[in-house]
Image (cartoon, helix red, strand yellow):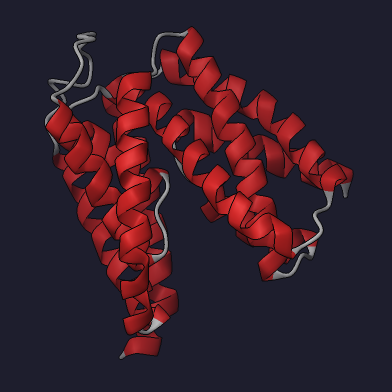
Amino acid sequence: MLGLEAVLGFVIGLSLSLLGGGGSILTVPALVYLIGQTPQMAVTTSLAIVGANSMLGALFHRSQGTLNWHVALIFGGSGMIAAYFAAGFSKQFPPELLMVAFALLMLLIGGLLITRKSARDDTQDQRDPTIWKVLLGGAGVGLLTGILGVGGGFLIVPALVMLVGLPMHHAVGTSLVVIAMNSAAGFLGHASDLSLDLSLIVVFVTAGVVGTLTGARLGQRLNAGLLRRLFALFVVVLALLLLADNLPKVI
């Protein structure tokens, strides 16, 4: 079991650091179906694992110059406020309908990322983006996260690339700070309800450190356009899986 936990931790850290997302999407099912935790325990444990790995990954990206703290803090702060006020809307819709809506949104985002011209991808321009675009992007992601109940890098990275205008490598590194902020807020809201398996968290995070370091170094060697297309493909595949699982329940 220790070997399985280490492998899973490595894959989660690699996904976060390389693509800027995929943490919770991978962690929660792994903890439930492979480790045997309850869904409630898995959500809380996932927040601890993803939050720690995201922060470590952000530090690795910072050392390589692919993290914009200014954008991350403003984007994440506005997103958290918007998500808090939008959360109540999700109760008015069936969960399956929300997941279908999220999957369709992901297909749209994936398609835009695949077809988007890559002229900006390889730029090394470090000028700070316009503040209103950062605030608008963060609030928009927070609004969708609050209504749909899901978010993370699958919404943050495309917003940073297409709306804020960050190069792909910088969007990945910057998104990790935002994910860490959201994970910390969610963990504090859940931690008092359950007793956590600290040894499991330590194994996942320790293996995740290796994964995040590997992802950060590998990401630097990959062409930004290729990295963007890999991310888009990941988003589209996940969206199709969500549609296959939830669309029959809505129709």
Tell me: 134 left or right of 240.
Answer: left
Residue 68 seen in this snapshot: no
Quarter residue 38 falls in: bottom right
In the rendered image of this protein, does residue 109 appear above or below residue 96? above
Q: Quadrant of the C terminus?
A: bottom left
**Left or right, residue 17 beside residue 130:** right
Name the spot of residue 146 as percent of width and height, x first. Answer: 35, 61
- Give the camera-side residue of 15 and 164: 164
Q: Is residue 40 left or right of residue 153?
A: right
**Residue visible at 54% across and 18% down?**
59
Query: In the image shown, does 152 or 112 lie closer to the viewer?
Result: 152
Q: Position of residue 204 (x, y in %)?
A: 74, 40
Q: Position of residue 157 (x, y in %)?
A: 32, 37
73 in relation to 80, above or below: above
**Above or below, comparing residue 74 to residue 156 in the picture:** above
Q: Visible in this render: residue 16?
A: yes
Question: Camera-side residue: 140 or 191?
Answer: 191
Whole-percent x, y for residue 35 in the image: 78, 59
Residue most extreme to the bottom: 251
Describe residue 176's horizontal placement relative to residue 75 as left or right: right
Residue sitting at x 14%, y 36%: 116
